Amino acid sequence: MKAFLDACVLFPTVMREMLMGVAAKGLFEPQFSPRVLEEWARAANRIGPTGEAQARAEIAMLRANWPKAEVSPTPALEARLWLPDENDIHVLAAAIAGSADGIITMNAKDFPRGTLAEEGVSRFDPDGFLVAMHGEDPVAVQEVGDRVLEQARAMSSDDWHMRALMKKARLPRLGKALSA
């Protein structure tokens, strides 16, 4: 399965690490566009003066690790599409250009299922998507979750627990599944 990742699931870190970790386990093929990566870099400014530089380094690593994941839609494809927020049209166009099965996004209202279905694309929220991946391969997803939890503990003064970390990352159902 190919899934296009919207900027809102690449930033924050825990969500991105879970998605890319699950992709690295072979459970899906991730896709992203240069514009989505640029949105992530600009959004990282919110975390402080070094946020964008850190995001750009992470983006460089993502591109190196996933050299075939980057897709760019043609202007003609973008011009024929419609979404409630015209700034999101490039996401749908890139998903179509990459023959993605779906778009993983937190932004449900701007990606109506009917409009996406007309293009043969589904919409997945990241929590539901990762729970479904857990259902397909619980061991692999648990391994990714354990690694992400270990990294969070190493980078923070907090003693994170799986359920709390995933809830903070807006992945509460996944946190429950990984804590069972």
Image: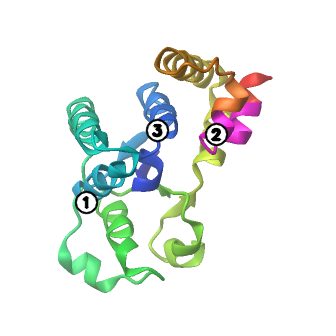
Disc 1 is placed on an element classified as: helix
Residue 6 shows in this picture? no
**In front of the other: label 1 or label 2?**
2
Amino acid residing under circle 1 = Arg
The residue indicated by pointer 3 is 28
CA separation, marks 1 and 3? Answer: 21 Å
Please rate how many residues cluster around mark 3, counting C-alpha atoms within 10 Å: few if below 14, some from 14 to 19, many from 20.
Answer: some
In the rendered image of this protein, does residue 152 appear above or below residue 48? above
Residue 149: x percent and y percent? 57, 20
Please give the range of residues in magenta.
166-176
Q: Is residue 77 above or below residue 12?
A: below
Compared with 81, 128 (above or below) is above
Check the image and name the residue furthest to the front.
Answer: 49
**Residue at 63% of width from left, 45% of height from top?**
170
How far across and how far down the image is residue 57, in percent? 22, 34
75 with respect to 80 (left or right): left
Circle 3: element type: loop
SS majority, magenta: helix
Q: What residue sits right under mark 1 in the picture?
A: 35
